Image (tube, rainbow, N blue to C red):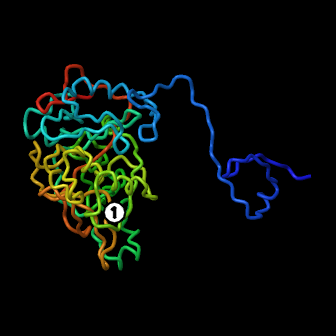
């Protein structure tokens, strides 16, 4: 006896169909519409009406650290809703997202401390992780020595982000712990206790500060499109769907991080690929900084052009370009803090009174 299941036809009629007919692959094609029940504790966002063009949206509880940051965000630079997966600082002048990392003292009083310890908060994840970018650039470094498909494989995978020299130098992977014979290319940010860093000693292996950086899943890949096809939303849709990923502490900013630091309403919407006004955003090196580097690497690659492997860059005029990965570009490390950090009371995120981690 065949087992029957009820279904709704496109004409609205309710009928039954043999389950065996579907199981045995007899050409029946059903649409599945999942149904589930929400918990009783949800709240709906004020102003939503349930219309098709204004559907109800569920309010998500904000992490405590975001609530704390909003208290000092009097000019409302933090986005009200998630933008590209984070509550982001968006704006130009007066963005109070300065934060010291590696010291419990005010690092905003002189250029030397700013260069060592000052970071900016890109945004806050729904889980409460702060995404930080170094205010000044480390220096000019190539992403990888090899840049041709003859050396990197026909698809360039042998020179992908986790296989690149820059990834290894940032995450302290070049020298094995205690290896006194380590020569040649050296680590430039995270280091072990033998080849330690005087400037960034707070990131030497075993440091309590290194433990405050979470292991993050960094997606990477090739867009295979020129930057002229992008705006913040379209590039986020591409970068967030990269199929390859690597777990590590240190990375770089994405194209969408750069574009999203500038509010859409203020952007050069008529030419979304160039976003020339993005140079005015707080995240650009020319804003409020002392860095001497004039252009910097982004984590995403353009892909293969001819036999050359190219990655994206931010140029001094504010535009996004691309370059072969063997050239020396500026490097600004990006990382995410663990969710258990607390900020010192009385710090406001201003450059002269940056947030300090207790």
Residue 143 visible in image: no
Of helix, strand and loop, which one carries label 1?
loop
Give above or below for 129 relative to 219. above
Give above or below for 113 relative to 23. above
Circle 1 residue: 164
Provide residue 214's location: percent of width, then percent of height.
38, 40
Residue 317 visible in image: yes
* Horizontal relation, residue 178 to residue 72: left or right: right
- Judge by depth and name the residue closer to the eye, 106 or 40: 40
Which residue occupies the extreme right position in the image?
1
* Horizontal relation, residue 116 to residue 247: left or right: left
Provide residue 341's location: percent of width, then percent of height.
34, 29
Q: Quadrant of the C terminus?
A: top left
Provide residue 97's location: percent of width, then percent of height.
21, 34
Instruction: Examine the image and state in which quarter residue 327 appears.
Output: bottom left
| Residue name at image x 26 percent, y 62 percent | 312
- Judge by depth and name the residue closer to the eye, 244 or 101: 244
Provide residue 275's location: percent of width, then percent of height.
19, 55
- Judge by depth and name the residue closer to the eye, 82 or 148: 82
Badge 1: how crowded within 10 Å, few (<14), some, or many (20+)? some
């Amino acid at each position: 006896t065949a087992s029957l299941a009820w279904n709704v036809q496109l004409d609205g009629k309710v009928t039954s169909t043999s389950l065996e007919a579907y199981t045995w692959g007899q050409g029946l094609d059903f649409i599945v519409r999942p149904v589930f029940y929400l918990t009783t504790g949800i709240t709906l966002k004020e102003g939503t009406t349930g219309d098709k063009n204004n559907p109800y949206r569920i309010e998500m509880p904000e992490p405590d650290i975001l609530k704390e940051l909003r208290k000092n965000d009097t000019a409302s630079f933090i986005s009200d809703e998630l933008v590209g997966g984070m509550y982001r600082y968006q704006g130009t002048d007066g963005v109070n997202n300065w934060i010291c990392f590696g010291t419990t003292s005010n690092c905003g009083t002189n250029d030397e401390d700013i260069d060592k310890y000052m970071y900016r908060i890109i945004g806050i994840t729904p889980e409460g992780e702060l995404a930080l970018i170094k205010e000044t650039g480390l220096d000019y470094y190539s992403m990888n020595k090899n840049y041709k498909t003859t050396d990197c494989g026909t698809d360039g995978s042998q020179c992908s982000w986790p296989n690149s020299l820059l990834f290894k130098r940032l995450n302290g992977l070049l020298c094995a712990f205690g290896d006194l014979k380590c020569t040649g290319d050296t680590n430039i940010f995270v280091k072990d206790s033998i080849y330690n860093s005087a400037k960034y000693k707070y990131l030497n292996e075993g440091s309590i500060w290194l433990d405050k950086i979470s292991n993050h899943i960094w997606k990477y890949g090739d867009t295979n499109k020129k930057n002229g096809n992008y705006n913040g939303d379209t590039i986020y849709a591409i970068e967030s769907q990269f199929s390859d990923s690597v777990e590590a502490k240190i990375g770089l900013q994405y194209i969408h991080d750069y574009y999203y630091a500038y509010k859409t309403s203020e952007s050069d919407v008529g030419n979304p690929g160039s976003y020339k006004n993005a140079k005015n955003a707080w995240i650009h090196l020319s804003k409020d900084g002392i860095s001497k580097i004039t252009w910097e690497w982004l984590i995403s690659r353009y892909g293969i052009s001819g036999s050359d492997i190219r990655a994206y860059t931010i140029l001094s005029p504010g535009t996004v370009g691309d370059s072969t990965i063997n050239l020396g570009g500026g490097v600004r490390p990006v990382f995410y803090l663990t969710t258990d950090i607390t900020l010192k009371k009385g710090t406001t995120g201003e450059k002269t009174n940056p947030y300090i981690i207790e």
